[in-house]
Image (cartoon, rainbow, N blue to C red):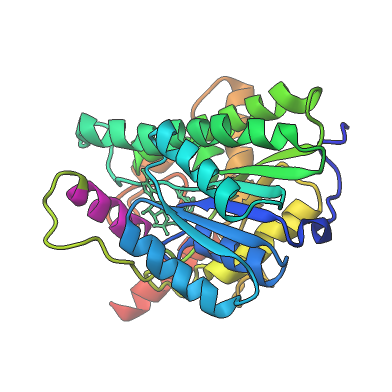
Amino acid sequence: MSKQQGELDLRQFKDQIAVITGAGNNGIGWGIAKHAALELGMHVVLVDLHMRVVDKACAQLGELAPHRKIVGVQCDVTRIEELEKVAQVVNEEISGHAIGMVFANAGVIFNKTILNSPLEDWKTTLDVNVIGVVATAKVFVPLLQRQSTESVFCSTASVGGLVRGDGGAASYQASKHAVVALTESLSFEIAKKSPQIRVCVLCPCIVSSSLMASSLVNKKASKGELDGEVRQLRPASNVFAMTPENHATQVFDLMREGKFYLVTDNVKPYVEHDYPFEASTIIRERFQNLGNLELDNSDAFVESEHGNATSILKGAMFQEIKRLNEIEN
Ligand SMILES: NC(=O)c1ccc[n+]([C@@H]2O[C@H](COP(=O)([O-])OP(=O)(O)OC[C@H]3O[C@@H](n4cnc5c(N)ncnc54)[C@H](O)[C@@H]3O)[C@@H](O)[C@H]2O)c1
């Protein structure tokens, strides 16, 4: 195994900079930002699509971590020139500190099947989720390469990027498979030349966030269909979801262990219940299918709680949701 993998001492990142895209709406990026500032002692650059959202997140983190430099930058990650401006701001406003970590985390989801989704939603999804990660890598990895100190480049895919496609968010899953593959490519591409850079791919299961809402709000805003400014959103509550804070703890625990695939399942101690998502089971199922060169569509014939068949949302957590719904009805 190259130096690029293996255990990572996170204490070395104190006083260094963490850049996190998609960090403005109290979701996964926010949890990572908070952990980076409060637990790792890093200076944080919060990036998101709308200024008001960025400002709010910056004020929140500034209050929690008054001794860290917290900088917010409005940026559309699909536009490389805007990411270059982020790099410029980092250089101007927090000069003299190494960039320790970069999280290409911004994303969107439109929860539709292939036949029911407009091409426009596919284009936006691939643009933000895939091109956004590529552009973030193209701007920041060369900066990390110039540093001799260790650093981390982490892209956010999803457990959906490791399992089979089903009847859910087809464009989302396709995009997340692409993120997994391109992050593996990036890891390979720089393994020999820049072993000081750890590359990893985050594959979360269920984390409280407003991803569906932020995707719709941003879509409306881009079409000029929103009344007023885009405001910061609060995560939708779900008793089985991880909080962004506990999720971030798991991210850094896996990173510390030197994992590449940061699959963050809904397991203790990161949640307080015994109903995991069971990512490893459905990941294994996909690879068993692949090994047999066959695709098992039997789940397509089983109606789920919401009337939609699924081959992914069927682990202990979803069995328990089903049981609770049955009691309620
Ligand atoms: N929440 C989950 O359970 C879950 C599970 C798997 C993967 N993910 C992934 O985690 C990442 C973060 O999502 P989240 O769930 O925390 O929701 P979130 O809404 O908090 O984060 C997504 C952020 O990306 C921003 N964004 C969207 N388009 C952008 C653009 N063009 N430029 C800059 N920023 C943009 C949004 O404004 C938003 O703040 C996403 O990539 C998502 O696909 C989430």
Q: Residue at x 61, y 46 (%)?
A: 102
Q: Which residues are magenta?
A: 210-221
Instruction: Decide which of 177, 75 is in the foreground and name it.
Output: 75
Left or right: 172, with 217 as reference point: right
Q: Is residue 222 above or below residue 52?
A: above
Q: Residue at x 35, y 46 (%)?
A: 109
Where residue 301 appears, as percent x and y from the top left, is: 35, 42
Image quarter for residue 251?
A: bottom right
Left or right: 103, with 254 as reference point: left
Image quarter for residue 276?
A: bottom right
Image quadrant occupied by the C terminus: bottom left
Q: Is residue 139 above or below residue 312?
A: above
Where residue 63 appears, as percent x and y from the top left, is: 53, 79
Where residue 43 appears, as percent x and y from the top left, is: 64, 61
Report the magenta stretch's main SS.
helix
Q: Is residue 227 magenta?
A: no
Q: Residue at x 73, y 61 (%)?
A: 15
Left or right: 261, with 112 as reference point: right
Q: Residue at x 68, y 47 (%)?
A: 99
Number of callouts in the render?
A: 0
Residue 276 visible from this viewpoint: no
Q: Is residue 218 magenta?
A: yes
Where residue 319 appears, as percent x and y from the top left, is: 48, 64
Residue 44 visible from this viewpoint: yes
Left or right: 242, with 327 as reference point: right
Image quarter for residue 249?
A: bottom right
Image quadrant occupied by the N terminus: top right
